[in-house]
Amino acid sequence: MSPTLAIVPVKIGRFDPAHVFPPNDPLTLPLFRLMLATDDVRHASVLFVMADQQVRETTGIQSVLHGGRMWYLFRLLCAHLNEGGNALNTLLNCVADMRLKDLLRDKPAATEALARLRPAFGKGTFIRNVRDWISSHYRQEDIKRVYERDLAAIPARVDGSLVACEVGVLSHFIVTGVLALHLMDAAAGATNDEEFSERCGEVVDLAQDLSTFVGHLIDALLKERGVQTTLDTIEVPALLRAARDRVERERGTPPGAS
């Protein structure tokens, strides 16, 4: 299995915005909203995956601190995905079905991604629960419910510890970090670690689906409007390469195959 390349090719599109995204086109503003959310999802997803790799590569209190950042980034990812879901619904409601079908006619990957995205958002979903309970909000009633449940467990599921550092931003309240993780357990409706891990994996997959759908949609729009692209390269961060290679090994897929 060959490792993920350190340098990978990219396409660069440069265009006249007024031509590709005219303000009077019903597609423009909903698509801009969706593009904003999608890039935020991409940023949060990359940071989450790299933080997860740092947790796996470290031990002791260093691993605990990386873990706190990792689960923060997961909550951030859910918040951005929730907004992406709202933006996607607005786009689907504002733009004629035939217009989207014409753009995506030769892009089955985008159509398949959209089919998975449609039911993934909204009230009662894992993403919305995380966003409402412990990401964009900190609902006191949910904190009370989960904390009292954890205290009553035998043995108690509360970690009574914290980390104080003279570099203040490296301090961490472990007691509430663990509580946040248990709130996410409850948001997922998971009964064990395996189920929770599976639900988290589904969120990461949805982030990829959103990126895939919007990327193909933009690609189709650029081609429709005659935009030419050029080639360049970018560096893949070492932590991201390590994380991607590990995931592909676990799935039994050669790193360079997808």
Image (spheres, helix red, strand yellow):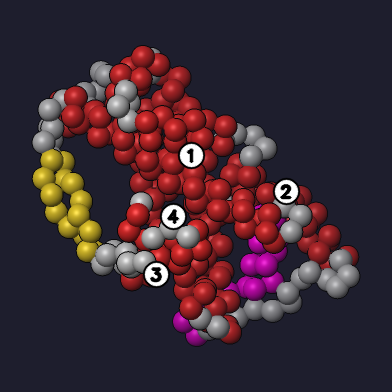
Mark 2 and mark 3 lie on one chain; the one further toward the N terminus is 2
User: Which residue is at 58% across, 76% downward?
Assistant: 64
Residue mark closest to the camera, 1 vs 4: 4
Residue 47: x percent and y percent? 42, 61
Whether residue 51 is visible: no
Helix, strand, or loop for circle 3?
A: helix
State how far apart marks 2 and 3 are (Cα): 30 Å
Which residues fall within the magenta stretch? 166-185
Q: Please state which amino acid type lies under the numbered disc 1.
A: Glu
Within 10 Å of disc 3 (Cα), the crowding (few <14, some 14-19, many 20+) is some
Label 1 vs label 3: CA separation? 29 Å
| Secondary structure type for disc 2 | loop
User: Which comes before the other along the chain, label 1 or label 4?
Assistant: 4
Q: Residue at x 67, y 37 (%)?
A: 124
Q: Which residue is mark 1?
A: 83
Label 4: which secondary element: helix
Name the residue that disc number 2 marks. 189
